[in-house]
Image (cartoon, helix red, strand yellow):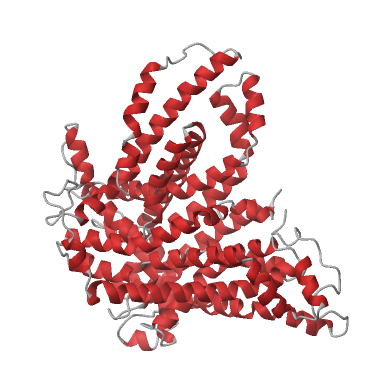
Amino acid sequence: MSPTPAATPAPATAAATSSVPAPGRRPRPGLSVSSARRSASKTLANAVLILLGLCFLIPLSWLVLASLDPEAGYTTELPKTFTLDNFAAVLTPELAFVPLLNSLLLSAGAAALTVVAAVLAAYPLSRYQLRFNKPFLYAVLFGTCLPITAIMVPVYSLFVQLNLLDSLPATTFFMAATFLPMAIWMTKNFMDSVPISLEEAAWMDGASSMKALAHVVVPLMRPGLAVVFIFVFIQAWGNFFVPFILLLSSGKQPAAVSIFRFFGQYGTVAYGQLAAFSILYSIPVILLYVLVARGIGGSFAMAGAMKG
Amino acid sequence: MTAGTSTRPALRPGAGPGHGNSGRTGALWLKLLPLAPAIALLGIFLAGPIIFSIYGSFTNAALTGKNAKDPQFIGFENYADLFRDPNFPQSLWLTVLFVFASAIVGQNLLGLGTALLMNKATKAIAAVVGVCVVAAWVLPEIVAAFVAYAFFFREGTLNQLTATVGIAPVDWLFEHPMLAIILANIWRGTAFSMMVYQAALNDVPQEISESAMIDGAGGALRLWYITLPMIRRSIATNLMLITLQTLAVFTLIYVMTAGGPSRRSATLPVMAYEEAFRYSNIGYGTAIAVVMILIGAVFSVVYIRLLKEK
């Protein structure tokens, strides 16, 4: 999070740029020219990348510096005195603990529900050749694309009609449903890579399909399921709009909404506390992301996943 | 290639659990039973609201008053209002502008460029810069929105930076609200495109690019004629996904400008929210939602088509 790691290599590369002459002529396919060109373009790539990295990092520097500054504003500056008072000030039950607990309940609940429903749904989709599979998978894929923001107004009216407004469990179920299409896709792909021969052995021993799923397949795909769980958890933890619309009383709102209500709506000038609370609230998802970065990276080859 | 169903080796008939040919329909029923929880969740909470919204958009449902208890069926009136409302074309245009500038141009090109540069650059530098780009994306959206707000604020970081080169401070959020939210969304979302393209470029065989280099093809030529065609499916996928994501951006805009000043950054999600919850016209807000769902549906269908072909 701090700007130092990206900033340190900068002088070294600048020196390297000047020492390598840029080839102006058209390159002939000779080895030495090509490698000189390559190292020049490497230096250029490094320089541009470092600049880009700084552009992405600079807005974040405010967050870190302000959280340590007793007199923080919206200006990015080194605090005259460093203090942890901002963190201490927000670590109260009303400001931090209750909202963070609500976030935890909401995210862990949604993630658990999603994983269970996704594993169950993925099993027939992965294991049987049914005519039903293809249309269902396309419907699910369609669901992954839907802009959830768009359906929040109708969801609100639905919750009013069903008397579910301001209910933490109902909001958890709704969140689980919004992440379920993506989770089914990921889970089915993980399940596809579990060899079927192991289950066949279980079937021979007379185990039912559900038994085979619980005792053979699920243990084998535990790392994959962890990725799905954490993926949903991160999304639910960071989601603002859904709880903002569906949860009304402050005792039930997760951190995403409480931070907005407290700092956004009432125009509080406690910028340092805002930054401190933002950091506290972000740390869990950053840690979880680091934990599963590889697994989630796999889901970026969405097209690859389709190829199977 | 199809949606993966045909990629698994087909089970021999009768190889599955509960085999035996008697009671085929019963067996099928049993086989599909594990799908029930997922179908129930998706049906109640996703399909339900969508169907409900289409009905709701034909009523005068409101948050308060007598129309809240007993909404009347009013036919196409909400839609007629929508197309008469001068705010609607403006919001539609702002949404198109936001999606085009921040996703299709900004995130997409910057993500592709970053991924290409990372392939060329020193590994350690590429990794550190990757972390910087991803950091903005991993943060919870409300935090990212506050950070972007602070950055573009009158006394904020951007004006501090421009002041060092002698440019007078600009009140970005008031004078150029669209520019501010577009840049903020590029900052926030480029990581996604970058990661998609990193994954895609990893799959481009090194030998092809190298043999072209030996043939004397320069960097730009290689990129245009070899690399880009080879990752065109990833490009199409990425464009569709970031379009859909950007279409739905609400929090970033709501926190930074709340659609203002005087609606100059009110994209469709913000407009739907304002109409439904601020002016408590649930029916009217739902009509806007239906328009958004339709736009999203068109893009989804195109996206699925793209994946299906080949």
Q: Quadrant of the C terminus of chain A?
A: bottom right
Where's residue B15, x and y in %?
A: 84, 72
Q: Residue furthest right?
A: B21
Would you place residue A69 above or below residue B119 in this image? below
Q: Using the image as rendered, state which of residue B97 and residue B171 is in the foreground.
A: B171
Where's residue B122, x and y in %?
A: 46, 33
- Residue in view at x 44 percent, y 76 percent: A155
Residue B205 in sight here: yes
Where's residue B213, x and y in %?
A: 62, 22
Mark count: 0
Residue A122, by quadrant, is bottom right
- Residue in view at x 84 percent, y 79 percent: B19
Where's residue A230, x and y in %?
A: 49, 65
Would you place residue B145 above or below residue B77 in this image? above
Residue B93 in sight here: no
Would you place residue B203 above or below residue A275 in this image? above
Would you place residue A94 above or below residue B310 in this image? below
Q: Using the image as rendered, state which of residue B246 and residue A262 is in the foreground.
A: A262
Q: Using the image as rendered, state which of residue B279 and residue A77 is in the foreground.
A: A77
- Residue in view at x 34 percent, y 61 percent: A282
Residue B2, by quadrant, is bottom right
